[in-house]
Amino acid sequence: MPHPSRPLAYICLALSMALVGSYVALSKPLAVAIPVFLLAWLRFGIGGIAMLGWLRKPADEPPLDAQTKRLLFLESFLGNFLFTMCMLYGVSLTSAVSAGVTMAAIPAAVAVMSWAFLRERVAPRTWAAVALAVLGIALLSLSKTEHSAHGGIGQNGENTSNLAWLGQLLLIGAVLCEAAYSVIGKKLTGSLGPKRITSLINVWGFALATPLGIYTAWTFDFAAVGAGTWVLLVFYALAASVWTVWLWMTGLKSIPAAQGGVFTVMLPVSAALVGVWVLGEHLTAIQAVALGIALASVLLATLPSRAAARVGSPQQ
């Protein structure tokens, strides 16, 4: 399968993280209405039904070796299952401010892991873009302190502010899982197509979530869930299991993981925009500046340069 052009790859990466930010922002009402383990199980189940046709092995694909199978399991366990658990529980136990500040560390985590595990050359300009991404999203998140509560509401309506420290740790775990997802995904794109990767890791996610999903479903009152929540669940499942993963793997086929990691800045940016456009929040001047800085990081990372061909090649 031919690699997409760099501009197309950039679009795929940006759209992927924008969708992730959207469903992260909208996952709070889902986590309130549906237990987290059941929510994860339903997500993978709906995604699996939507991708049945993608599971078929292409004629030109070589047999899966032991290393590829291990990477597929780790990609699903860290990037799908564990990230989903940490993100859903973390968002439910902390404020939007804490979540935004923590997620701002994703570009830096991806760059460090790419350098350490993939031995990618990370250009100074990419490091500068990472710094801008972190600065912009941290400023955006900190600017919301006057408008956000510092605690969450649990599934039974209780105040979870006393567990905010646990939520913060879970969000840090989500950051590390997302960074590992980017690095392992780059490795997988060398031997498998984006659709095949997306469907296979979703199968692993469904298998991992099934035991606790069935246990939770046994006593859950499905009739108490409103029609709007079911519609939101379907969007969440398709966005989280299908669209975002396929777009991300497509983009990573021709982009170094460290450079692609800068696009994770779109996650908290899009979450903030969903808050403004969907949830009725107001965008202040300082928040607009923060968004501008964050988006400048993407521009800095994607402008062509004579060193672009060398960035991302393995170190000697």
Image (cartoon, rainbow, N blue to C red):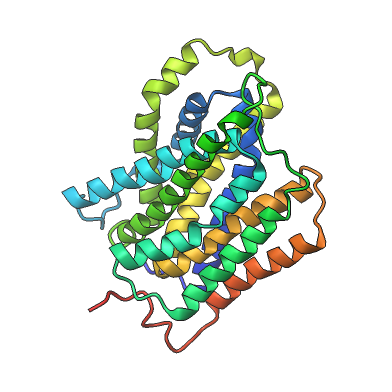
Q: Position of residue 98 (x, y in %)?
A: 61, 46
Q: Position of residue 233 (x, y in %)?
A: 60, 32
Tell me which residue sits at (47%, 63%) in the image. Answer: 108
* Quadrant of the snapshot with the N terminus: bottom left
In the image, 186 versus 114, the foreground residue is 114
Question: Relative to 25, is 40 on the left or the right?
Answer: left
Tell me which residue sits at (45%, 89%) in the image. Answer: 306
* Badge count: 0
Above or below 114: residue 243: above
Tell me which residue sits at (51%, 83%) in the image. Answer: 304
* Quadrant of the snapshot with the C terminus: bottom left
Question: Relative to 23, is 197 on the left or the right?
Answer: left
Above or below 113: residue 25: above
Q: Position of residue 71 (x, y in %)?
A: 27, 49
Tell me which residue sits at (25%, 55%) in the image. Answer: 61
Question: Relative to 128, is 74 on the left or the right?
Answer: left
Q: Position of residue 265 (x, y in %)?
A: 57, 60
Q: Is residue 204 visible?
A: yes
Q: Is residue 19 visible?
A: no
Q: Residue furthest bottom?
A: 306
Q: Residue furthest top?
A: 219
Above or below 52: residue 305: below
In the image, 2 versus 221, the foreground residue is 221
